[in-house]
Amino acid sequence: MKVSISSPSLLPLLLCAPISAFAKDSTNQYLSDVHSIRQTINLYPLAVDYKELDRLDALFTPNATYSIPLTFGTVYGIEAIKEKIRETTGTAKTQHLFASETLTVDSKAGTATGKVYLLETIFGLLGPNVTNTFNGYFNDNFVRTRRGDHWPELEWRFTSREFIPLIPVILPETNP
């Protein structure tokens, strides 16, 4: 497949995009979609780490699912997602680091899937001087939606997010 680049300013973006995507979608639409999805992925840890969970409203669809099987199972709907994160992290401090993201985007259908590796450190969850680290990845599903009546530009939101641990998590036993 031959790809010609008309604008030098697109070169850095093209180098980050998988070539196979050019067969399905127009280059400009694809790049715009990838950028928007990356923004959605990157804004998630900021909302959680800064405990600004109302910002998740812009990142998840109202009926999204969120699953972390080992710690709190699956919850349905944005309000339940925010409540479960609040309940689980409490006053503990979190730090999310993402890496090695892959995306499969169908611009015409307005859907995408992705995987992003995660290293999450939680400070003070199980005690004042206790640090817990979780390693794994998120399996994500996205849909392109409109922001609302006053925001005509399109954005991408999570329809589902599932954490898959790569290293077994050993949780402390709790005694009633």
Image (cartoon, grey):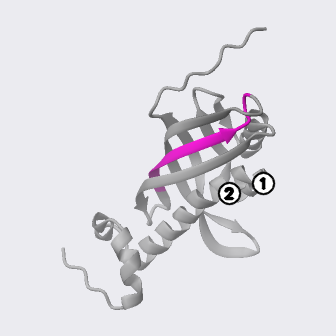
Q: Amino acid at mark 2?
A: Leu
Please give left or right for residue 81 compared with residue 20 in the image. right
Q: Is residue 138 left or right of residue 64?
A: left
Residue type beneath disc 1: Glu
Is residue 56 something that shows in the picture?
no
In the rendering, at what x and y percent does residue 87 appear? 78, 34
Disc 1 target residue = 52
**Of residues 6 and 107, the one drawn nearer to the viewer in this rendering:** 6
Tell me where the magenta segment starts and ends, as one range. 112-126
- Label 1 and label 2: CA atoms lie apart by 8 Å
Q: Quadrant of the C terminus?
A: top right
Q: Residue at x 33, y 91 (%)?
A: 6
| Dot 1 and dot 2 residues touching (CB under 8 Å) | yes
Earlier sequence position, callout 1 versus callout 2:
2
122 is within the stretch colored magenta: yes
Residue 71, compared with residue 38, is above or below; it is: above
Q: Residue at x 44, y 34 (%)?
A: 166
- Give the residue at mark 2: 46
Is disc 2 placed on a helix, strand or loop?
A: helix
Q: Depth check: 151 or 130 in front?
A: 130
Instruction: Tell me residue 70's x, y (percent).
Output: 58, 26
- Where on the picture, by quarter, is residue 21? bottom left
Q: Is residue 101 above or below residue 131?
A: below
